[in-house]
Amino acid sequence: MKVEILGPGCPRCENLLENAQKAVEELGLDAEVVKVTEMGKIMAYGVMSPPAVVVDGKVKGTGRLFSVEEIKRFLKE
């Protein structure tokens, strides 16, 4: 599983990255969590309002800081 956090590197993006890492850890998943800051890659996903969470190439949520619990739901879908 690959979890991508899309965003320019703002504090919300950093917090979202931490929440995603914590969600993966709490669920005991074997997942790679990466931060994507390149605007070209972000726009390729059709994301116009970062930050965003992408799981295995599918955008799960955009535009705000998602909680650990919300990210866990994304990971279980």
Image (cartoon, grey):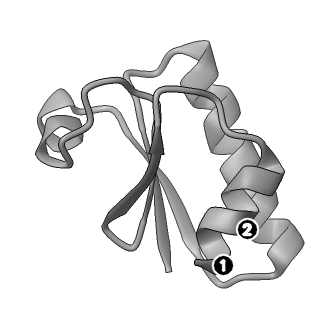
Label 2: few (<14), some or many (≥20) within 10 Å? many
**Disc 1 + disc 2, Cβ < 8 Å:** no
Q: Is residue 66 left or right of residue 5?
A: right
The residue positioned farthest toward the right in the image shown: 26
Quadrant (top left/top right/bottom left/bottom right) for the C terminus: bottom right
Label 1: few (<14), some or many (≥20) within 10 Å? few
Q: Which mark is residue 24?
A: 2
- In the picture of the structure, the residue carrying the numbered disc 1 is 76
In the image, 58 versus 38, the foreground residue is 58
Residue at 68% across / 56% down in the picture? Answer: 71
Q: How far is disc 1 from disc 2 in space, using C-alphas?
A: 10 Å
Amino acid type for the residue under numbered disc 2 = Val
Residue at 70% across / 66% down in the picture? Answer: 73
Residue at 53% across / 70% down in the picture? Answer: 32
The residue positioned farthest toward the top in the image shown: 10
Tell me where residue 67 appears, x and y as whole percent.
Answer: 77, 42
Using the image, determine if residue 39 lies above or below residue 31: above
- N-terminal label among 1 and 2: 2
Amino acid type for the residue under numbered disc 1 = Lys
Q: Is residue 48 left or right of residue 76?
A: left
Using the image, determine if residue 12 lies above or below residue 71: above
Tell me where residue 44 appears, x and y as whole percent.
Answer: 12, 46
Residue at 61% across / 20% down in the picture? Answer: 12
In the image, 55 versus 11, the foreground residue is 55
Tell me where residue 51 appears, x and y as whole percent.
Answer: 46, 30
